[in-house]
Amino acid sequence: MKLSVCVVTYNHEKYLAEALDSILMQEVDFPIEIEIGEDRSTDKTLEICRAYEKEYPEIIRLHVNEKNLGYNWNFYRTMEQCRGEYVAVLDGDDLWTDPQKLKKQIDFLDNHPEYSMCFSKYYVCDEDSKLGQVTGFSGDYDLNDVLAGQCPGTRTVVFRKKYFPAVLPDEFEQISYADHILFALIARQGPIYGLDEPLAAYRMNPESIYSSKTMETRSLNIIQNYQLMKKVFSNKEQLKAIDTGIVNERIKLERLYFFTCRPFKFIGNSVRIFLYDIRHLKTALLKSWIVIFKTGLKVLIGKTTLKQAKA
């Protein structure tokens, strides 16, 4: 088997058919399989999965968990079922937008055996699948880049299955978002490469594990993830990269706390950034305040809104 597509889904009845259709539309000249991990949904997601499995029995294999495992373990268990040389990932509420996505990425990896992963930029879309801005990054990256926050969009990645960790670190149980640590473990095996074009779309689903949380909660969860990752990636350069990722999240919080008028949290967060600056001889706090000052001016003269300033 050349490629497996890992699809994890829970309560995605509104979006799952579109996600699966975007896989089935792929123009490839190699065999693929679709491994679906269904996490005991309470809506009609399972019915949709079974209908697609019945229609495409030679391609789709459905795995229904005995109980709800949550995103991380559903993702990992479904990944274990993948039999391909390569694995692509798509959550049940996202979609692929280019019918040659897999071909482009497999062509790259086949021709560059030193790379462990290929990813791409992606669109942000709304609940009605209207494509909006393009986000993400492209080019060459290594493990330290991933640790510092350059984590590819899950819906865009294709990686070599042999590099997927057979044994997970104990910290996996406490991680909020599994993709970051898993992609870092894969990047440990070789550099990763991003194509400079959008090949997929991330849906702003208000009920998703990420979008349903406040901006503050998301950043604090990411910071907690980074602290846990320090136990897995512990050499000097790796720890320095992780600290960079942490301070970047704290800079986001700095802006949020300032424009939502939470002085105590703002001061506490500033102290943490200052301590980072002392340890690493950086000026992150000063740069953060300059950005806040410039953004505040834009709000005052009407060039941006207060809501945009918080983001």
Image (cartoon, helix red, strand yellow):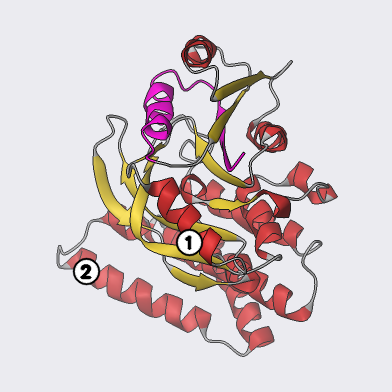
Mark 1 crowdedness (10 Å alpha carbons): few <14, some 14-19, many ≥20: some
Is residue 228 depicted above or below 37 in this figure? below
Residue placed at 50% from the left, 66% from the top? 193
- In the drawing, does residue 147 fall left or right of residue 169? left
Is residue 248 depicted above or below 290 in this figure? above
Q: Is residue 266 visible?
A: no
Q: Position of residue 56 (x, y in %)?
A: 49, 18
Give the residue number, with chain letter if any, for mark 2: 298
Placement of the C terminus among the 4 image quadrants? bottom left
Give the mark toward the camera: 2 or 1. Answer: 1
- In the drawing, does residue 230 fall left or right of residue 254? right
Mark 2 crowdedness (10 Å alpha carbons): few <14, some 14-19, many ≥20: some
Is residue 80 depicted above or below 50 in this figure? below
Residue placed at 43% from the left, 34% from the top? 23
Q: Nearer the viewer, residue 165 or 132?
A: 165
Q: Among all residues in the image, which is located at the extreme front?
A: 29
Q: Is residue 180 visible?
A: yes
**Whole-Å distance between the Cαs marked 2 and 1?**
43 Å
Q: Position of residue 214 (x, y in %)?
A: 48, 43
Give the residue number, with chain letter if any, for mark 1: 108
Q: How many marks?
A: 2
Magenta-colored span: 1-27
Placement of the N terminus among the 4 image quadrants? top right
Residue placed at 72% from the left, 33% from the top? 77
